Amino acid sequence: MENSITHTEHRDDTASKMGMWLFIFTELLLFGGLFIVYSVYRSKYTADFHVAANQLNTFIGTVNTVILLVSSMTVAMSVTALRTGNKGLTLKLLATTIFFAFLFLVNKYFEWGLKFEHHLYPGSELMLTLKRGELLFFGLYFFMTGLHALHIIVGMILLIVIYRKIQTGRITKDDNVLLENGGLYWHLVDLIWIFLFPLLYLIS
Amino acid sequence: MEQEHQHITSYRTYAIVLTALLFLTAITVFVTWFDLEALTIVVAMAIACVKVTIVISYFMHVKHDKLVFKLMVGMVFILILVIFLILFSDYLFR
Amino acid sequence: MEISAIENSYLKHGTKYKGILGWLTSTDHKRIGLMYMYAIMIFFLVGGLLGGLMRLELFRPGQDYITAQTYNAVFTVHGVIMIFLVVIPGLAAVFGNILMPIMIGARDVAFPKLNLFSFYIYIFGAILAISSQFLGKGAPDTGWTFYAPYSTDTNTNVVAAVLAAFVLGFSSILTGLNFIVTIHRMRAPGMTWFKMPLFPWSLYATAWIQLLATPIVGITLLMIIAERWFKIGFFDPNLGGDPILFQHLFWIYSHPAVYIMILPAMGVITEIIPTFSQKRVFGYKAIVFSSVAIAAVGYLVWGHHMYTAGMSVTARWFFSLLTFIVAVPSAIKVFNWISTMYKGSINLQPPFFFTMAFIFNFMIGGLTGLVLGSLATDIHVHDTAFVVAHFHYIIFGGMGFAFLAAIHYWFPKIYGRMYNNKLANTSCALIFGGFTLLYFPQFIIGLQGMPRRYFDYLPKYEWGQVFSFFGAIVLGIGILIMLINLFKSARKGKIASSNPWGGKTLEWTIASPPTVENFEEIPIITEGPYEYK
Ligand code: HEM
Ligand SMILES: [Cu+2]
């Protein structure tokens, strides 16, 4: 630590990264609360949950899983690319990640859209006629995937900002913690999906 | 504050990690074709835990981070686990 | 020390803006801390007046001044304001901000802009909380606990209040995050973990609770809103939900939240006692570990609020056991404080008197906590005035008195001036006396069966309510005298030296009030924080 009198913003990458991790912890616990609710009702209404889960489209779910995994790799690679000084490749990899994020949302849109067409959405009349366990399952399904999609959107915006900053040279080979943090956030979105996917789509 | 040595993970490692993750995904989907009853959820969660560990260690490179990061991450997951256990001391025995 | 110290201090120098704008845009941790203090003081006065209103209604049995519905609304806002706006941010946001960076030898927190941002989130949450009173269909009437399914059914404006709690939680999370990183990364060279003063240690333990517990209530509150809007049925038994699950989720946060309130208070007390005993703190490591243990075990005892709610028997005795375990580290701290004073050269000054009051109240609050924590007795006193007395003894008698001790202890450091000792002692005596008169009778009528949150009662409880009413008046007078003393002294008090109490921690080595930079040169630490000769 230098002893300068001025309030120099000394850079501490470890501090920034720690801040990001702490934030990720809060997100994990946020979803943790939902997983608690899920597991309680699943243990209470096991049969209903199976029936309801059958109506989800495993195919779209699997595709979205693959999309997120691949995008997680591309964003991780973009850090490597930046650190080895390959700005062009960094930007390409980031653009790919952002594209995948968008693709995920498009899929989600169609998935939800189909449910809405069948009058299955929170607060619909049909929902209220379902069995209690099924109602809870769909409630949780919309709440959890909705919140997750919100995180995808936030992550996407974050990555776009980072993309601009790399382009304009405000994130560089030596000063890359922002990209790293953006990447961490994106992996978080992936982490949560890794649990959501089997719990919602694969229990039929 | 001097910059710490930054570990750079190779593209190849990432590619291998992705392959492993996709493989595990394939297995989870595959096992649902069989009726394992109560075991289904156990298998699915076990695989998910493996996947999460891989993502955290490699993609989020905790493997090459300082010890504090490892401790913090470990602590948070243990906490979540303990909350589950204590909560179910209610629901399982009601 | 002459007047020039004040002229050179953070009070006069800040950002490029002058006057009020210079405060509102400042990222200086000391200015942010002071802004929190003024905001919290205003909310405290509002909350206190509402409390006075309830005491007035309870002065006699029957309905006198306000209707039952208004009474419900009043205890709800009173609780929301006091818990979410006053005591949870309380010590951490005010004294944590102002002093923690100085005590660890840093120029500021790790993320100063984030710090200012969380202040504005706090203000935004406060505005939401207050507006919930006026917007929509009537003020919320659920109590600060928002228990479902009533909170998902009532027509009152619950959504705004719930949203306010959510937003305030976010502010609390960001403060905690900032403090953890600051303490990890910005300690002065040579200050190892075990050379760090104990107030920062308690803030560190607190920050982890803020970080790891708040998200759970955040998501729970969002579920309440979703349930109100979309009829999802998370907590509504008619739709298959389980209202007890709401209580679980709520207390998973809100029990740790009580440690968010009390841990920094314990930290303050641990700073004050060595200074006024001129003696090294007894059992430094025991205090550190008990802080950490309280944070850790305190996370796991939430079920003691739900003994009568319908949990399984297994869960009930298990939570009772855990509750008893968490009392152990709290007791360890009390022993440490007493042992520190033993054979010290005690200096009887206002901060020390407030500290004594703290220890006294905290012991009563803690022991009655054990009465509540043991399964069998709680069945009898749950939801009675006994509980009300318990948590007021801990929160007001404990955290509140620690706050007052802290302000009297660090006042010369913060403002560079000294208050009137005699007035301070008088106000301390009045506040303590009024407080005791106000809350002690509640224990007794609670044991006799006076339920909490009722606007009416049987005549046999009247004597207690009358005592409480007069206690509230004495308490109010004491607070008024204290405020007058402090406000006057902040502007016109005698100039204070940089170390009026003979403290040893780093904040006493710099000017009073500190400069913007805190330290001209970052000190190099070689010995522990309490090395008195
Ligand atoms: C020795 C430690 C403590 C123990 C064993 C303890 C135990 C309890 C128990 C069992 C209850 C539930 C009573 C009931 O509703 O029937 C309770 C209520 C409460 N306690 Fe404590 N407590 C302790 C310390 C604290 C501290 C440090 C605080 C705050 C700073 C606190 C604040 C509260 C509050 C706010 C409530 C009432 C919540 C409500 O229902 O509105 N307690 N306590
Ligand atoms: Cu509690």
Image (spheres, coloured by chain):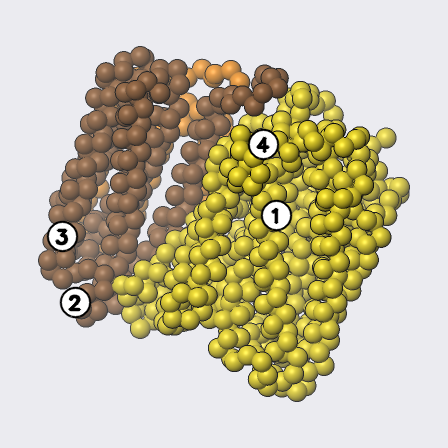
Say which amino acid is labelled 4. Gly
> What subunit carries mark 3?
A
Q: Would you name the residue on which mark 3 appears?
A: A113
For chain A, the rendered hue is: brown
Question: Which label sits in the foreground, 1 or 2?
Answer: 1
Q: Which residue is mark 1?
A: C37
Number of callouts: 4
Nearer-N-terminus badge (1/4): 4
Mark 3 Cα within 10 Å, few/some/many (few <14, many 20+)?
A: some
Q: Quadrant of ligand 1?
A: bottom right
| Rendered colour, chain C | yellow
Residue shown at 68%/82% (left/top)?
A: C462
Same chain assignment for discs 1 and 3: no
Label 1 amino acid?
Met
Q: Give the alpha-carbon distance from disc 1 to disc 4, as whole Å.
A: 18 Å
Identify the residue at horizontal 23%, vertical 58% (top origin): A138
**Residue identified by numbered label 2:** A126
User: Against C399, is A173 above or below?
Assistant: above
Do dots 4 and 2 share one subunit? no
Q: Which chain is orange?
A: B
Instruction: Please say if the residues under marks 4 and 3 sit with CB atoms less than 8 Å apart.
Output: no
Secondary structure category for the residue under label 3: helix
Residue C409: % across, % down: 75, 44
Q: Which mark is residue C75?
A: none
Disc marking residue C14: 4
